Amino acid sequence: MALLGSMLIIVQLSMVVLLGAAIFTPIASAAQALLPQAKPGCPEKCGNLTIPYPFGIGDGCYLRPEFNITCNQASTHPTYLTRTNVSITNFNFDEAELQIAHAAAYSCHDARGNKIPSNSGSDSVYYLMLPPLYTISETKNKLFVIGCETFAFLDFGIADPTLDGTNSIRGYSVAACDNLTSNNKVPYTCSGVGCTKSVLVAGLITFEIILSYLNRFGEQNRNKTKWFYKEYPCSYAFLVEDSKFTYAPNTSFQQLSNNKQLPVVINWEVGDDPCDVVGKSNNSSCKGNSKCVDRSIVPGKPGYICKCLDGYHGNPYLTDGCQDINQCETLSSNPCNNGTCHNLDGSYYCKCNSGYRNQDPKTCIPGTKNTALKISLGMLVNFILLAAIYI
Ligand SMILES: *[C@@H]1O[C@H](CO)[C@@H](O)[C@H](O)[C@H]1NC(C)=O
Ligand SMILES: *[C@@H]1O[C@H](CO)[C@@H](O)[C@H](O)[C@H]1NC(C)=O
Ligand SMILES: *[C@@H]1O[C@H](CO)[C@@H](O)[C@H](O)[C@H]1NC(C)=O
Ligand SMILES: *[C@@H]1O[C@H](CO)[C@@H](O)[C@H](O)[C@H]1NC(C)=O
Ligand SMILES: *[C@@H]1O[C@H](CO)[C@@H](O)[C@H](O)[C@H]1NC(C)=O
Ligand SMILES: *[C@@H]1O[C@H](CO)[C@@H](O)[C@H](O)[C@H]1NC(C)=O
Ligand SMILES: *[C@@H]1O[C@H](CO)[C@@H](O)[C@H](O)[C@H]1NC(C)=O
Ligand SMILES: *[C@@H]1O[C@H](CO)[C@@H](O)[C@H](O)[C@H]1NC(C)=O
Ligand SMILES: *[C@@H]1O[C@H](CO)[C@@H](O)[C@H](O)[C@H]1NC(C)=O
């Protein structure tokens, strides 16, 4: 019976291939054109960044107000998420992530530990607040507190699906220095001396850090010269995409003093329903040749994004956004051993060279393609199978 079944499958596959060959004539081998990412009639780019729908610039160009983009050509990173005014530096569209640039909190001191006033006065505060449909990636970012005698007050807003609001969680992180090496340098690794690195909790929608002075030495020593402030006058606290920042005492302090804008990875989802609900509604954001994929950016809370079906590529949120991939051209070498590749909508098949036959539509194996015989054999097998079932 199992043998009959597999024979049946093989035979029916060869029939499918025959039909495919008859209906779909090979598509002309034009290079895959770049597919549009923005909604038709809307700006494709802001600066050198392509803006993919559901994001968009201008009314009617974004799917929901949360995806409204402001393009301010005058600034260094001109693409802003309108709702929060954070600047987007990259779209990792396939993973439904954004990279933003956010300024580190910092605080600089004279040799006696007295804070040097800064221009804006709020430089020692880090504040990131995200609208619904976004969270700070807990897997891709880390929290760094860098400096000597540095006290960082932390206030996290964590989305709470049971409250339909946020939970505020507060804590502290400290980075301090003491006499460790003969030359008064902090260690080379982020070890808690001069630097602490922490992992994040999931579901973060606000992140606030207030930097201040730890004052381990008591009030009586407050205004006395401290060696570490000569060597490391500034403290920093920030979130950063882990792979984009490596702590090293001989470079990091200088690097941060030159550039405080650091990359942070943000998660997004297109809606906050699970796919089984989206699938039953007539309100899915996933357009033709695409599928709904569950994506929970807040633990315990559903959400979804869209992806093109296998064999298609492009933007799944646009009508006709997902287009066939011509695998005959895009796969690095001919995917058909002992055959020629023919593109199909969403797939391809291999037309076998003489002396070979299809084991399945994508594999040619040695053998003769006696198709007429196979079809009649297939019909016979079908008949026997049907007879076996119905008798
Ligand atoms: C985009 O522009 C920025 C600033 O001009 C530049 O640093 C960056 O390398 C550019 N990115 C690409 C992909 O060209
Ligand atoms: C979208 O952003 C533009 C500015 O870029 C603003 O004028 C408009 O009011 C925003 N729309 C919504 C719905 O927030
Ligand atoms: C957004 O931030 C930029 C600088 O980061 C600033 O120039 C601009 O005024 C801000 N816009 C709003 C509406 O806050
Ligand atoms: C720490 O280092 C300073 C300066 O090098 C030195 O004056 C002091 O005695 C050291 N303290 C200890 C406890 O080793
Ligand atoms: C710190 O000490 C210096 C020198 O002794 C003095 O001039 C200054 O006023 C002191 N600052 C404070 C805040 O006590
Ligand atoms: C920083 O320190 C490390 C570890 O000793 C060393 O390998 C590296 O060359 C130093 N880099 C600079 C720029 O001094
Ligand atoms: C589709 O959704 C709209 C509201 O968004 C509703 O009025 C309509 O009845 C729905 N149609 C079906 C077939 O569910
Ligand atoms: C349809 O989806 C939009 C967002 O994509 C949402 O705001 C709206 O409430 C949904 N409507 C229904 C009937 O589910
Ligand atoms: C058939 O395919 C196999 C595996 O790639 C290859 O080794 C062989 O040379 C091919 N035969 C012909 C005639 O192309």
Image (spheres, grey):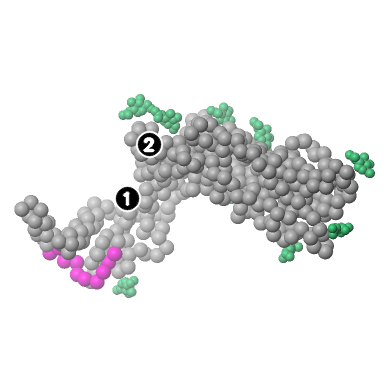
- How far across and how far down the image is residue 56, in percent? 52, 36
On the image, the x and y values in percent for residue 311 come to 36, 52
Pinpoint residue 54: horizontal percent, then vertical percent.
Answer: 48, 38
What is the residue that sits farthest to the left in this orientation? 391
One can see residue 130 in this view: no
Q: Secondary structure at mark 1?
A: loop
Q: Position of residue 369 (x, y in %)?
A: 19, 66
- Which comes before the other along the chain, label 2 or label 1? 2
Which image quadrant shows ligand 9? bottom left
Local packing at callout 1 (Cα closer than 10 Å; few below 14, some 14-19, many 20+) is few
- As rendered, which of 210 and 290 lies closer to the eye? 210
Residue range (magenta): 363-375
Against 52, residue 363 (above or below) is below
Can residue 200 be spotted in the picture? yes
Q: Which residue corresponds to mark 1?
A: 345
Label 1 sits on what residue type?
Asp
Which is nearer the eye, 203 or 177?
177
Q: Nearer the viewer, residue 343 or 228?
A: 228
- Residue drawn at x 61%, y 53% as measured from the top left: 242
Q: Is residue 123 left or right of residue 382?
A: right
How far apart marks 2 and 1 lie (CA) works out to 25 Å
Q: Would you say the residues marked 2 and 1 are in contact, meaning their CB atoms lie under 8 Å apart?
A: no
The structure residue drawn at horizontal position 31% and vertical position 53%, both measured from the top left corner, is 344
368 falls in the magenta region: yes
Give the residue at mark 2.
278
Image quadrant containing the N terminus: bottom left
